[in-house]
Amino acid sequence: MKFLKIAVFFISITAFAQGKVGAVDVEYILSKMPEMTTVQTQLETYGKQLDTDLNKKIDEYKKLAEEYKKGEATFTGEQKKEKQTALLTLDADIQKFQENGSKLMGIKQTEYLQPLYKKIGEALDKVAKAQNYTQVMQTNTDLVYLDPNYDLTVPILTELGITITAEEGGE
């Protein structure tokens, strides 16, 4: 029984030692992809449309508020209550639209970036298999040191057909 435990221990150490771990900076790759220009343009266009819609709502609110101020003295109690309710409803609608605007932008960004992430994933898969990597981590602020020999960012850029200068490769 003791021999079996020792054998399993050595097999697991051997298997772990044979694993090759690399890292990749996906955000850097994204920033170098020519498709990002299109994505940024699409996001700007969508953002402008959201701004236009918001401005329409704000203009409508201002118009209603101005009408209320002008006619407040002549309104009956029922009319005042009706106009105030309309103003409060529109104000709440504007606030909700503003809150949802950033969420909508995030959803659109994810939608536009999904094909790019897929391309990166496919290139990563090819590079990792070709260089016998068993695990690849994404670099982030928690990564303190990475041996450049295990950084797959540049090989993935090459696989995607993106060339970078020597200065850019050092980032």
Image: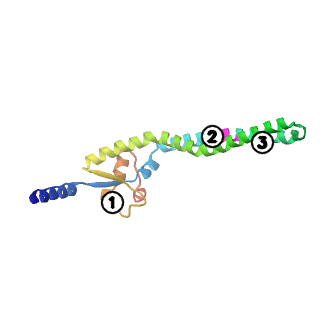
* Circles 3, 1 touching at the beta carbon (< 8 Å): no
Looking at the image, the residue that sits furthest to the right is 74
Q: Is residue 157 above or below residue 167?
A: above
Q: Position of residue 99 (x, y in %)?
A: 61, 46
Q: Earlier in the sequence, mark 3 or mark 2?
A: 2
Mark 1 — residue? 148
Based on the displayed image, in which of its 4 quarters is residue 143 positioned?
A: bottom left
Q: Amino acid at mark 2?
A: Leu
Q: Nearer the viewer, mark 3 or mark 2?
A: 3
**Magenta-span inclusion, residue 50:** yes
Q: Secondary structure at mark 3?
A: helix
Crowding near the residue tagged with mark 2, few <14, some 14–19, many ≥20 C-alpha atoms within 10 Å? some
Q: Is residue 160 visible?
A: no
Looking at the image, the residue that sits furthest to the front is 77
Mark 2 — residue? 50
Residue located 38% across and 48% down the image? 157
Location of the N terminus by quadrant is: bottom left
Q: Amino acid at mark 3?
A: Lys
* Circles 2, 1 touching at the beta carbon (< 8 Å): no
Residue located 29% across and 48% down the image? 128
Q: Position of residue 100 (x, y in %)?
A: 60, 43
Q: Describe residue 170's horizontal placement relative to residue 101 as left or right.
A: left
Looking at this view, is 53 or 27 the one in front?
A: 53
Mark 3 — residue? 62
| Mark 3–mark 2 distance (CA, rounded to whole Å) | 18 Å
